[in-house]
Amino acid sequence: MDVAVLTIFPEMFDRFWTHGIVRRAIEQGYLKGDAIDIRAFAEDRHKVTDDRPYGGGCGMVMKPEPLAKALRAARERMPEAVTLMMSPQGRPFSQQAAAELARQRGLIFICGRYEGVDERFAQQFVDDEISIGDYVLTGGELPAMVVVDAVVRLIPGVLGGRDSAADDSFADGLLEYAHYTRPPVFEGRPVPDVLLSGNHAAIAQWRLEAALVRTFLKRPDLLENREFTAQEIAILKKWSKELEDLIKVQSARCTDPLSGRQ
Ligand code: 4HQ
């Protein structure tokens, strides 16, 4: 995949391209990453990329001409690329959005600064606006890195079998199960027995239960529109039965006169 980032701060990406999975993806030929300096496409003597807003008010707006020149240069090199702009007004970014972008041949990111870019540039050139969350940042560079980071690890081949994306949180709509490594007891806390058992079916069952209970406790919203599998229904029924049994035993024992026992 070809990635080009249009920014007035291309140096912000120098460290981004050279670490971890992103670096490995580049070295192994899965990713090409390029930060393009918008300022290099400004034609005046002072290389100005921003200007005061029409209608007055505070802040500055990114001028459309340098952006258009920079984008046309990028598109010439990558004619199949989709043009994305980072903006709090964009489509909320998600694991599913990342998976869709991972299927593209090329991505061009427009990173605004100040109050954003001239609206005519956005309307003329931007295919999709993406937001990484409901908060306001000082520029689109960090959001572009967030999106590239989430997308690159979903390009087939980038993660080996050792760190596959199949079990990721959100990959199947659930949070990921808890992880443990050595030692078997850390400051008095043991690793769950089943994980040491070598019984792979039991481990898979435990992990699904652990993912389900975590999601239920930490992010119940993720379960609201979920289509449960038969195995998940079985787990939920088992919990519900265990809870019912517990309630029966407890209410039989209960002597509190205000408890409303029937
Ligand atoms: N900004 N998700 C304003 C964001 C943002 C976000 C990027 C700040 C664009 C002009 N981008 N500039 N949240 O807050 O993507």
Image (tube, grey):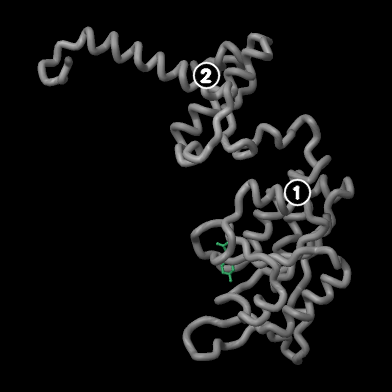
Q: Secondary structure at mark 1?
A: helix
Q: Nearer the viewer, mark 1 or mark 2?
A: 2
- The answer to whether 44 appears left or right of 219 in the picture is right
Task: Using the image, tell me which numbered label, if any, was put on residue 152.
Answer: 1
Q: Taking 10 as reference, is 31 above or below it?
A: above
Q: Secondary structure at mark 2?
A: helix
Assign ligand 1 to one image quadrant: bottom right
Is any atom of residue 157 visible in this view?
yes
- The answer to whether 29 appears left or right of 195 in the picture is right
Q: Quadrant of residue 60?
A: bottom right
- Point 73% across, 55% down: residue: 16
Q: Quadrant of residue 144?
A: bottom right
Q: Quadrant of residue 182?
A: top right
Foreground pick, 197 / 200:
200
- The answer to whether 119 appears left or right of 233 in the picture is right
Foreground pick, 190 / 147:
147
